[in-house]
Image (tube, coloured by chain):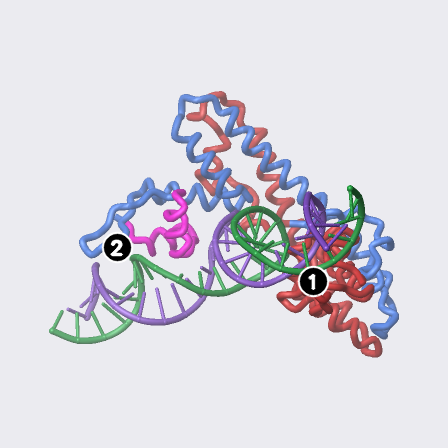
Chain colours: A blue, B red, C green, D purple
DNA sequence: CTTGAACCTCTACCTGCTGTAGCTTGTATC
DNA sequence: GATACAAGCTACAGCAGGTAGAGGTTCAAG
């Protein structure tokens, strides 16, 4: 029987985060000690590790929920698992592309500014006037 | 005198967002009509455009606040402006690097899985076991 | 038996908005 | 002047994905 602190240490998660995952139904409600403290099994440790690792790969909690559900039915086709991962890959690629555009723009901005007074600062000028931008950055980059 | 809706349309911002910026002190409190509706000047439009454009380049509201403050003192050195932009560039580069690592990992995961049953799915295996990862992805990728 | 670390619940806060409810104002048309 | 309707107003709740703190209880070692 593992305490919440042990789980936290072994998976590199904060204690509060584990309780949060329980609250949103991502982790099951564990058993309790006499005094009411959470007591976990090894299976819970595995599940939490899965969640954390998926988070590190950028999956949303919703996607992780889906992956966990899928992995509970081992006889089903893994096409759905594939689809979830593909979607995640596309999202990551998207984000990279958008950030890349920002990077180029920021670099250009910085390289252009050689003024020393704020009044002549090219950076501020570019920020003031979208027209001076070459990049197409419609959405904020998340 | 411009209404909030006009400002919204011209800058591609939602009306609520403008009110939110006012609430957090990023936009000044504008004058009001007899009936209490906000009425803006052209300077407000410029300021909002600056904010929105900076947001599109990924600057945080805190950074934007700083940039706006700096641009209010045109005689000062623009070194600080430069510093803010540099920091933003570094953050973007960081995020790109982390996402790039994720991309590689996700791609590898996907290419390895040729099972059709969930039970044999490589993707789920990799997610279960961090050790199977080559990439070093300590933090979630934001 | 006492100490002190670790646990408990509950609530609020973070960023950067977005949406809704319920009401008021402004303006164009008749 | 009456009326219709868009657009404005305030206030509050909610999103992701947690994090922090208050104030109190339990567990395990010595």
Q: Main secondary structure of the magenta part?
A: helix
**Which numbered disc covers residue B37?**
1
Q: Evaluate whether residue B90 shows in this view.
A: no
Label 1 sits on a secondary structure element that is loop
Quadrant including the N terminus of chain B:
bottom right
Q: Chain of mark 2?
A: A
- Among the 4 quarters of the image, the one containing residue B119: top left
Front residue (pair A139, D10): D10
Q: Chain of mark 1?
A: B
Badge 2 crowding class, 10 Å Cα cut-off, few under 14, some 14 to 19, many 20 or more, is: few
Seen from this angle, which residue lies furthest bottom? Answer: B75
Q: Evaluate whether residue A105 shows in this view.
A: yes
At x 50%, y 22%, the residue is B115
At x 76%, y 48%, the residue is A137
Tell me if label 1 and label 2 are in contact, CB under 8 Å.
no
Name the residue tied to disc 2: A37
As drawn, is A81 to the left or to the right of A129?
Answer: left
At x 79%, y 71%, the residue is B71
As drawn, is B6 to the left or to the right of A10?
Answer: right
> What percent of the width, then of the height, locates residue D1?
72, 55
Label 2 sits on a secondary structure element that is loop
> What percent of the width, then of the height, locates residue B75?
84, 78
> What percent of the width, then of the height, locates residue B24?
62, 66
Q: Are marks 1 and 2 on the same chain?
A: no
- B35 relative to B122, above or below: below
Front residue (pair A89, D15): D15
Front residue (pair C22, B22): C22
Given this view, does label 1 or label 2 mark the residue nearer the observer? Answer: 1
> What percent of the width, then of the height, locates residue D13?
48, 53
Asked if residue A114 is among those painted magenta in the image, a careful observer would answer no
Asked if residue A9 is among those painted magenta in the image, a careful observer would answer yes
For the record, the magenta segment spans A2-26
């Amino acid at each position: 029987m593992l305490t919440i602190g042990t789980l936290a240490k072994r998976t590199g998660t904060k204690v509060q985060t584990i309780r949060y995952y329980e609250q949103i139904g991502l982790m099951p409600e564990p058993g309790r000690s006499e005094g009411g403290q959470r007591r976990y099994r090894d299976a819970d440790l595995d599940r939490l590790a899965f969640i954390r690792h998926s988070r590190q790969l950028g999956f949303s909690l919703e996607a992780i929920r889906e992956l966990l559900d899928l992995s509970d039915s081992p006889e089903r086709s893994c096409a759905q698992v594939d689809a979830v991962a593909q979607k995640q890959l596309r999202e990551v690629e998207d984000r990279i592309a958008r950030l890349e555009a920002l990077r180029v723009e920021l670099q250009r901005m910085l390289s252009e500014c050689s003024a020393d007074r704020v009044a002549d600062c090219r950076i501020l000028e570019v920020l003031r006037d979208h027209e001076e931008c070459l990049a197409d950055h419609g959405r904020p980059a998340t």
